[in-house]
Image (cartoon, rainbow, N blue to C red):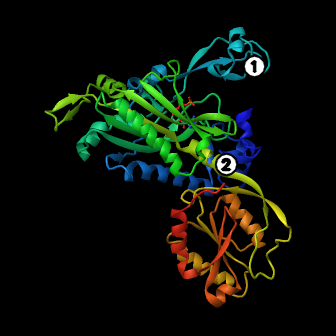
Amino acid sequence: MSELNEYNGKATMEKITSLAKRRGFVFQSSEIYGGQNGAWDYGPLGVELKNRIANAWWKEMTQLHDNIVGLDAAILMHPRTWEASGHVENFTDPLVDCKKCKTRFRADMISEENLAEKKCPDCGGELTDTRKFNLMFKTNIGPTEDTASVIYLRPETAQGIYVNYKNIVQSNRMKIPFGIAQIGKAFRNEIVTKNFIFRTCEFEQMEMQYFVKPGTDEETFNEWRKQRWSYYEKLGVKMDHLRWHQHGPDELAHYAKDAYDIQYLFPMGWRELEGVHNRAGYDLGRHSQFSGKDMQYIDQDNNNERYIPYIIETSAGLTRNVLMILCDAYDEEQVASDKNSDSSEGTANGTADDWRTVLRFHPNLAPVTVAILPLMKKDGLAELAQDIRAELKEDYATDYDQAGAIGRRYRRQDEAGTPFCVTVDYQSKEDGTVTLRFRDSMEQVRVPKTELAARLKQEIKTYKRIK
Ligand code: ATP
């Protein structure tokens, strides 16, 4: 219970889910038909947030590392891939069903007592024996539906990287150590898909596979653990909501020599956000064996020494990162009303105190960077505001809102996580200055409109979260 208290009753999964829907971050898939389990649609704000998280990761991995290159492999792969990877044989969850209420459970997620007594945790009915359930979605390709046409939707993006490793070494003259980064969809037939977008059947991963000489793997593994930790620090995530979890011998996947998860304190408790794995020589060894192709690396700088590279993997869920960033940014606070300088009407800031919901996104991740708000529609203020927007949108994601009282418009932007608002008023017409309002502090300063773009750039670069 104590861990839940850290949220002080603020971010609950219900609040996040409802805000996500209300503001167009995430909708249930095919909602008009009652929804599709384990599938979600990203709305106008959600797709921007997801893209920015993906871009931040991509920049970190490729632009900031001279020896990491990108890839975008197909979702459909030769079925032998999944035999080689071990997924056909090992990618299973233990499954039990209640004979009475028909609920299906992952055996490793119910108590040992219930399992031993074969008793349903929900209704007390009798449970079936534990069965192995493969998480891969299987379908058929081509005009016939026989065993020869079986194909899988990839359950991870990593295999697309392994099967292309030789292509990339040859085409891009990569020398070990080097990495390949990829972002893409993955599919798993998850038995339990609760907690909004935390665990879904269709999701996106951001994976980087780093190829090293055997013997240097442990050092590189530790180095990547450090790098992944400081990445989240750079994103401005609450660092006391992150921790490491090392996999014990029972948890280690069939391919792993060592594995650590970065866990985040979600409203429902500590859960995995990203895995950092030492996969040793398993993957390329298996692909050599199953494809009959030589997957050895030839070290031309070292007497043509040959070896199967070891692999260090960093594997993060993109959609799970979206949930993490939403939870991390979510805040509710009681605040004094926004002041607005020389506004004779349309401010509606009558009450002394007010509650606001605010998403404290890092400006680099916020779906809208700056909203332009004319104090009034009339007297040329709307036109002036539109001109300012036209100038800013070359460099920033902008929004424009002229509807309703200014205080309410600020609240709408707070709830969407917009870090900056620019208000255009009568003084703007006279002296060319506008009000720049900061989401986190609610402070307002007057800035010449000609200096706005540069000021925003500087504010984004030096941004520090204050709460
Ligand atoms: P779990 O044990 O929670 O099922 P896992 O250990 O199998 O997850 P990995 O295979 O290591 O997960 O996947 C790497 C990352 O991909 C995870 O850290 C997570 O962020 C993301 N991920 C995995 N499965 C899902 C899913 N069903 N929905 C959303 N994200 C997922």
Callout 1 secondary element? loop
Precedes in sequence: disc 2 or disc 1? 2
**Residue receiving disc 1:** 121
- Residue at coordinates 65% horizontally, 33% vertically from top-left? 193
What type is the residue that disc 2 sits on? Phe
**Which of the pair 141/85 is nearer the observer?**
85
Q: Is residue 211 above or below residue 461?
A: above
Can residue 107 be seen at all in this image of the molecule?
Answer: yes
For the C terminus, give its image quadrant: bottom right
| Residue, far left | 303
Place of residue 265 in the rendered image (x, y in percent of width and height, measured from the top left): 64, 38
Q: Is residue 329 above or below residue 346?
A: above
Q: Indicate the quadrant where residue 364 lies.
A: bottom right
| Disc assigned to residue 27 | 2
- Residue at coordinates 66% horizontally, 46% vertically from top-left? 327
Q: Indicate the quadrant where residue 208 lies.
A: top left
Left or right: 223 as drawn, with respect to 31: left
Of the two numbered discs 2 and 1 in the rendering, the one whose residue sits closer to the viewer: 1
For the N terminus, give its image quadrant: top right
Q: Is residue 214 above or below residue 404?
A: above
- Residue at coordinates 63% horizontally, 54% vertically from top-left? 43
Does ligand 1 reach within 8 Å of label 1's beta carbon? no
Does ligand 1 reach within 8 Å of label 2's beta carbon? no
Which class describes the residues within 10 Å of circle 2: few (<14), some (14-19), or many (20+)?
many
What type is the residue that disc 1 sits on? Pro
Place of residue 216 in the rendered image (x, y in percent of width and height, measured from the top left): 31, 31
Determine the quadrant in which ligand 1 lies: top right
Distance from the alpha carbon under mark 2 to that under mark 1:
30 Å
Left or right: 271 as drawn, with respect to 216: right
**Which of the pair 81/458 is nearer the observer?**
458
Place of residue 386 in the rendered image (x, y in percent of width and height, measured from the top left): 61, 79
